[in-house]
Image (cartoon, helix red, strand yellow):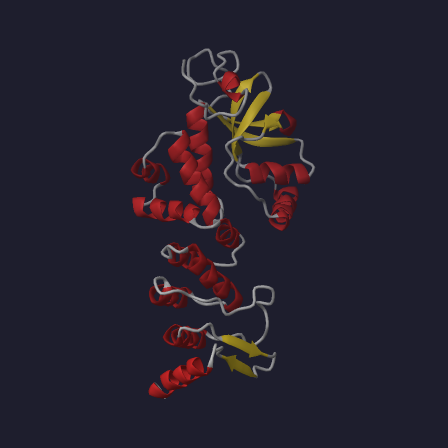
């Protein structure tokens, strides 16, 4: 017996495979509306279980809703027919939601033929190509295309019209810790920052650099330099995680000098600063001999 888990939701597989409700061929017995743009009632449309977008910007939805009230739907949604007066959304969930907000009861829709895998591919590809997904949503969409449609990276890249290296770069983002993925989702860091952080194998070093990047607003080039310099020798976080917005936070050049000094002295250097930028550089020592050794090291490079 084949116990392999279906890629479809519970109960959905039986619906899609039911010849009485599923339109998967273009035989002459199918209703003439298939393949045409028709106006259908919104309340007979079920949402797409394969929708890759996890969040919808409420403000942008309201803007689209206002536009629909004024101008109507410019681009029809795409649905598949499940049975008499029953449809399932393939693409256009933002337009569907905004139309509901605008008080519309009907919406123009392109009705097409699709089986389960075709529906999944169309929904994912359409969203990747046309919607403003964040990098993590794109990465998850690529992952679903490959896993649920049994595609290689090369085949996935052909489906979406992207280079295979681009698909691979997005998929690598899913190896990052959840905290970094969330920061990327909410634009606290960019794709360039994330790609640089991926190259840090040690989780503690990776998170220390990440926290300083968020706190100090380092550029992608600065992060790349930090990774090249400290990925293998260690990096101590200098920012205060709970107060990343303190004015006059240390610039990148100063951060790098502090880390170089810390590694040279083999000591964790503490920095005390006020909002005006004044402060103290504190280097701990354990004994008189340790203190003399520190002074000697500093004098050698003075």
Q: Residue at x 57, y 30 (%)?
A: 47
Using the rendered view, name the quadrant where residue 196 is placed.
bottom left
Q: Residue at x 60, y 67 (%)?
A: 243
The image position of residue 9, as x and y in percent, is 52, 25
Reply above or below: 300 against 200: below
Given residues 160 and 171, the one toward you in this image is 171
The image position of residue 81, as x and y in percent, is 53, 21
The image position of residue 260, as x and y in percent, is 38, 74
Q: Residue furthest right?
A: 103
Given residues 127 and 188, the one toward you in this image is 188
Visible residue check, residue 65? yes
Assign the N terminus to one quadrant of the image.
top left
Position of 149 compared to 280: left or right? left
The image position of residue 42, as x and y in percent, is 63, 29
Q: Residue at x 37, y 75 (%)?
A: 264
Assign the C terminus to one quadrant of the image.
bottom left
Using the rendered view, name the quadrant where residue 246 is placed.
bottom right
Position of 217 compared to 301: left or right? right
Reply above or below: 263 against 189: below
Given residues 64 and 205, the one toward you in this image is 205
Visible residue check, residue 114? no
Using the rendered view, name the quadrant where residue 96 is placed.
top right
Reply above or below: 69 against 219: above
Q: Residue at x 39, y 82 (%)?
A: 293
Reply above or below: 213 against 4: below
């Amino acid at each position: 017996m084949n116990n392999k888990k279906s890629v479809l939701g519970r109960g959905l597989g039986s619906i899609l495979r039911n010849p009485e409700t599923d339109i998967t061929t273009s035989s002459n017995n199918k209703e003439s509306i298939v393949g045409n743009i028709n106006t259908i009632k919104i309340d007979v449309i079920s949402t797409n279980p394969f929708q890759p977008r996890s969040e919808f910007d409420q403000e942008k939805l309201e803007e689209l809703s206002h536009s629909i009230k004024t101008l109507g739907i410019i681009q029809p949604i795409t649905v598949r027919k499940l049975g008499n007066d029953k449809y399932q959304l393939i693409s256009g969930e933002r337009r569907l939601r905004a139309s509901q907000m605008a008080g519309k009861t009907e919406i123009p829709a392109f009705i097409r033929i699709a089986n389960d895998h075709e529906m999944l591919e169309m929904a994912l590809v359409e969203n990747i190509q046309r919607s403003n997904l964040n990098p993590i949503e794109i990465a998850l969409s690529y992952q679903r295309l490959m896993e649920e449609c049994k595609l290689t990276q090369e085949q996935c890249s052909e489906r979406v019209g992207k280079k295979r290296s681009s698909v691979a770069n997005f998929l690598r983002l899913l190896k990052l810790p959840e905290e970094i993925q969330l920061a990327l989702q909410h634009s606290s860091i960019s794709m360039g920052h994330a790609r640089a952080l991926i190259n840090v194998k040690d989780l503690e070093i990776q998170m220390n650099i990440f926290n300083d990047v968020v706190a100090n607003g380092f550029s992608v080039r600065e992060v790349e330099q930090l990774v090249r310099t400290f990925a293998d020798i260690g990096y101590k976080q200098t920012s205060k995680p709970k107060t990343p917005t303190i004015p006059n936070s240390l610039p990148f050049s100063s951060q790098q000098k502090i880390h170089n000094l810390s590694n040279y002295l083999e000591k964790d250097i503490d920095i005390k600063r006020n909002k005006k930028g004044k402060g103290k550089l504190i280097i701990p020592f354990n004994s008189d001999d340790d203190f003399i050794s520190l002074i000697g090291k500093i004098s050698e490079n003075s």
